[in-house]
Amino acid sequence: MHNAFQAGHQASSWDLGHFFAALVWIFKDSPARREDFIELTGSAVFACEHCPHRWVENNEVAGQAVEICPAVQTFL
């Protein structure tokens, strides 16, 4: 089943794996950037790490990405 979701992802050419990873790496190992993000947006919610091999379980990651996207756009 995971391969079916991965095949669908590749067929869409949306490159969600890199998008999810980028949302995590913006704030990973950077407490100053996290603090600035919280100050500017008022949100302390950050992206979850995704698993590139278990696409079915990335539902929470996708939901979190949708939730924080407006705040990240404001921050950037």
Image (cartoon, helix red, strand yellow):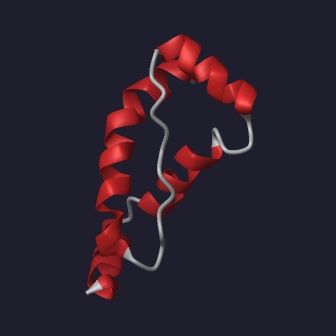
Res. 61 visible in picture:
yes
Q: Is residue 36 above or below residue 44?
A: above
Give me the residue at 64% from left, 38% from top: 27
Q: Dividing the picture into quarters, in which one does residue 57 lie?
A: bottom left
The picture quadrant where one finds residue 43 is top left
60 with respect to 45 (left or right)? left
Give x and y (percent) for residue 41. 48, 16
Name the residue rendered at 48%, 19% in the picture: 74
Q: Position of residue 70 (x, y in %)?
A: 38, 26
Q: Is residue 38 above or below residue 12?
A: above
Instruction: Report whether residue 15 is seen.
Output: no
Residue located 69% across and 27% down the image: 33
| Number of numbered discs overlaid on the protein picture | 0
Taking 53 as reference, is 68 above or below it? above
Work out which quarter of the rendered image holds the C terminus and state it: top right
Q: Position of residue 12 (x, y in %)?
A: 31, 66
Q: Specify the quadrant that holds the N terminus.
A: bottom left
Q: Position of residue 9 (x, y in %)?
A: 34, 70
Q: Between 3 and 9, which is closer to the camera in this rendering?
A: 3
Q: Nearer the viewer, residue 75 or 59?
A: 59
* Residue depicted at x 48% and y 27%: 44
